[in-house]
Image (tube, rainbow, N blue to C red):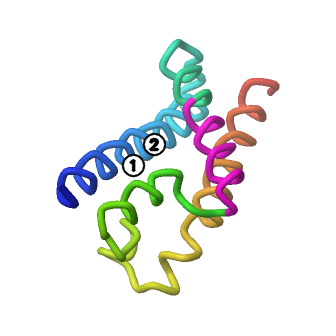
Amino acid sequence: MIWVIRLIHTLIALIFFAGIAVVYYSAVSQTYNLWLYLALGALFIEGVAVTLNRGDCPFLFLSRKYGDDKKLLELCLPKNVAKQMFKVLFIVILIGCLLLLFRFLF
């Protein structure tokens, strides 16, 4: 069961990484379409969920319920780096949104 949870969690993470890529692509190409709005909405919802979980992934409770003792990012990154990834990703998303806003206004 743990591998199913990790697989679903990985797919969700890939969708959010794709959302970040859409934000940057839209900023650079000045393309404002449904994909951008979906990406921004998904990233906002994920940000709220992570904030409500005090910086942890909302999927963590399900992983722990089935006995998974590692966070998804800890599978591929050192623990101290994985712990900071939400902060890093927040900055990456913020820069993308600011670039998007700048390109929209100017």
Q: Secondary structure at mark 2?
A: helix
Task: Name the amino acid type tagged 1.
Answer: Ala
Residue 45 falls left or right of residue 60: right
In which image quadrant can residue 83 be found?
Answer: bottom right
Which residue is nearer to you in this view: 45 or 62? 62
Distance CA(mark 1)–CA(mark 2): 5 Å
Q: Which residue is mark 2?
A: 16
Residue pictured at 65% horizontal, 36% vertical? 44
Corner quadrant of residue 72:
bottom left
Which SS does the magenta portion mostly show? helix
Most extreme residue toward the right, as rendered?
105
- Residue at x 18% of width, y 58% of height: 3
> Which residue is rendered at x = 59% and y = 20% of the image?
37
SS at circle 1: helix
In the image shown, does 87 or 50 lie closer to the viewer? Answer: 50
Q: Are marks 1 and 2 in contact (CB under 8 Å)?
A: yes
Is 18 drawn above or below residue 63 in the view shown?
A: above
Residue furthest to the top in view is 34
Q: Amino acid at mark 2?
A: Phe
Q: Residues within 10 Å of mark 2 (few under 14, many from 20)?
A: some
- Quadrant of the frame with the N terminus: bottom left
Q: Is residue 69 left or right of residue 55?
A: left
In front: 21, or 49? 49
In the image, residue 51 lies at what x, y percent? 70, 53
Q: Nearer the viewer, residue 30 or 91?
A: 91
The x, y position of residue 61, in whole percent, is 47, 58
User: Magenta residues?
Assistant: 42-54
Image point (54%, 39%), residue name:
24
The residue tagged 1 is 13
State left or right for residue 59 relative to residue 99.
left
Q: Quadrant of the C terminus?
A: top right
Query: Horizontal and vertical percent for residue 74?
Result: 38, 76
